[in-house]
């Protein structure tokens, strides 16, 4: 689970804590797995020399006051190493960052966050904003946002011109009482609701592939938040402000204005409390808007996603729509043409070596480990590339809590070890195509196309 770098890690932290207690009481023997558990426990409760014995936050602050600059640098390196190793940030890490700003130690921040040259450039350019984000949103209760902040800087998101002023607006936001109540219900009242939301914003912008739908039927909404954080962060921040201040989100569908405040219930009947703060705020509204767009298409003969996806997700979604099944019967239709178009659109060896420019919404048919159909599912196609074994793979984002799944007939989704970046899942190109049922394309023809490999069709049939 941690290999996918999820944003919502509270259940994982609780699991680690419980296992640690059982091990310390010698109630369970983990064998070789104990080394891994020790790494996780250390990352949470004793990542550095100054807090290796988990002394408590007040005692740790006293220890920091007695350290010289070299010792503080060692602390910073220890925190960064542990955080980036497992993807978890310790409460002590949050206290350390706040202590540095309160004690003229801001020059140690880049080391404490484990920044590369890109992240360092971003921090130096937007120093005041980053310091304010730490002061306003980084507390022991929101410690995981330290990792989100580090990755936000590493992605260089602040260099996108509208993002920095949008974050200043987010910092000074006054939440609508209903939004504040939802956040308090989900994350407690130890900190103001606006703090939890700001911390969540940092995490989503830093880890766009860490957004998850939780145990909610809202994969479309989770995918939208992830895509915007990945590709259109200032639009996401605008959506958050709309809902946070007005408890309503406005979108347009084919020229018609849709206001979530006036719409009927969506697929989800309860608030998504098992998700991140941004999702808690946005998903109920996105869910209603998505369903309303579906209602607008109810009389049309084709799959409604042909019209919904470009309007719901953004201008960068291809306007050509390819689907492998007949909507009315559920049977395959022109599968050869569907396959050929996908090869010529997305496979680098057959599309003129043109990479995926913008992430694209696609639909897959999820099957069980026995190959039985479970249902349709929304994922995001991110890129197509060779792995280290020269296997062409499709790398995609799955809003499911666990992207590593066995889809039957030897189609097993990988989440690490095959060239995946954190949060990505992947399958060999042909295996992914065997589960694909809809995708978008555009009519722009760039590069020299190669002939589609008809010899791949029998291989695809093996995985269907």
Image (cartoon, rainbow, N blue to C red):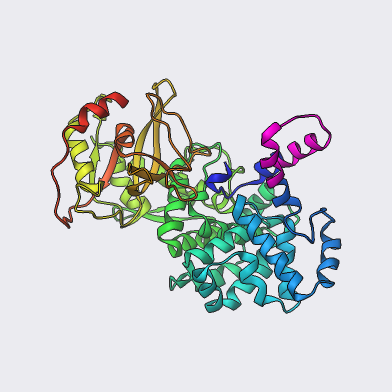
31 drawn magenta: yes
> Who is closer to the viewer here, 378 or 42?
42
Does 426 sit above or below residue 226? Answer: above
Q: Quadrant of residue 15?
A: top right
Q: Where does residue 420 sit, x and y in percent of width and height?
A: 44, 47
* Left or right: where 71 falls relative to 169: right
Q: Where does residue 71 sit, x and y in percent of width and height?
A: 76, 70
Residue found 54% across the figure and 72% down from its top? 120
* Left or right: where 223 falls relative to 443: right
Can residue 176 be seen here? The reply is: no
Dominant secondary structure of the residues highlighted in magenta in the image: helix
Query: Which part of the image, by quadrant, shows the N terminus?
Result: top right
Residue found 49% across the figure and 62% down from its top? 237
Provide the residue span drawn in magenta: 16-40
Residue found 69% across the figure and 66% down from its top? 76
> Who is closer to the viewer here, 84 or 256?
84
Residue found 47% across the figure and 46% down from its top? 222
Q: Where does residue 251 sit, x and y in percent of width and height?
A: 39, 55
Q: Quadrant of residue 394?
A: top left
């Amino acid at each position: 689970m941690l290999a996918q770098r999820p944003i919502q890690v509270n259940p994982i932290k609780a699991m680690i804590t419980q296992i640690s207690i059982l091990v310390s009481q010698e109630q369970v023997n983990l064998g070789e797995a104990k080394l891994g558990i020790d790494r996780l426990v250390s990352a949470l409760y004793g990542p550095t020399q100054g807090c290796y014995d988990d002394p408590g936050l007040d005692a740790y602050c006293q220890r920091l006051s007695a350290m010289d600059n070299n010792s503080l640098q060692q602390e910073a390196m220890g925190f960064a190493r542990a955080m980036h190793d497992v993807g978890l940030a310790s409460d002590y890490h949050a206290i350390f960052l706040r202590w540095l700003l309160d004690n003229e130690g801001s020059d140690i921040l880049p080391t404490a966050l484990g920044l590369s040259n890109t992240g360092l450039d971003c921090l130096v350019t937007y120093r005041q904003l980053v310091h304010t984000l730490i002061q306003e949103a980084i507390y022991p209760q929101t410690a995981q946002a330290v990792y989100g902040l580090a990755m936000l800087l590493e992605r260089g998101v602040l260099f996108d011109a509208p993002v920095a002023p949008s974050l200043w607006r987010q910092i000074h936001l006054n939440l609508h009482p209903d939004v504040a109540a939802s956040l308090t219900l989900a994350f407690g009242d130890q900190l103001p609701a606006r703090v939890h939301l700001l911390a969540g914003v940092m995490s989503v912008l830093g880890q766009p592939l860490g957004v998850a739908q939780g145990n909610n039927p809202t994969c479309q909404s989770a995918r939208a938040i992830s895509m915007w954080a990945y590709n259109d962060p200032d639009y996401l921040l605008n959506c958050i402000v709309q809902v946070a201040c007005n408890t309503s989100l406005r979108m347009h569908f084919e020229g018609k204005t849709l206001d979530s405040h006036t719409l009927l219930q969506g697929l989800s009947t309860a608030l998504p409390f098992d998700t991140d703060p941004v999702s808690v705020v946005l998903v109920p509204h996105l869910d209603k808007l998505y369903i309303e767009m579906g209602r607008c298409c109810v009389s049309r003969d084709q799959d409604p996603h042909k019209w919904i996806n470009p309007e719901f997700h953004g201008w960068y979604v291809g306007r050509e729509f390819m689907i492998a099944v007949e909507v009315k019967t559920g049977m395959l239709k022109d599968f050869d043409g569907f396959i050929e178009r996908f090869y010529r659109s997305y496979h680098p060896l057959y599309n003129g070596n043109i990479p995926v420019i913008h992430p694209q919404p696609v639909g897959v048919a999820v099957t069980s480990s026995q190959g039985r159909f479970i249902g349709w599912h929304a994922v995001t196609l991110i890129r197509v590339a060779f792995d280290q074994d020269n296997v062409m793979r499709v790398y995609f984002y799955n809003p499911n809590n666990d992207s590593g799944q066995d889809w039957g007939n030897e189609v097993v989704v990988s989440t690490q070890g095959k060239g995946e970046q954190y949060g990505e899942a992947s399958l060999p190109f042909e295996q992914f195509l065997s589960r694909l049922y809809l995708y978008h394309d555009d009519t722009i023809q760039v590069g020299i196309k190669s002939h589609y490999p008809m010899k791949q069709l029998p291989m695809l049939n093996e995985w269907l």
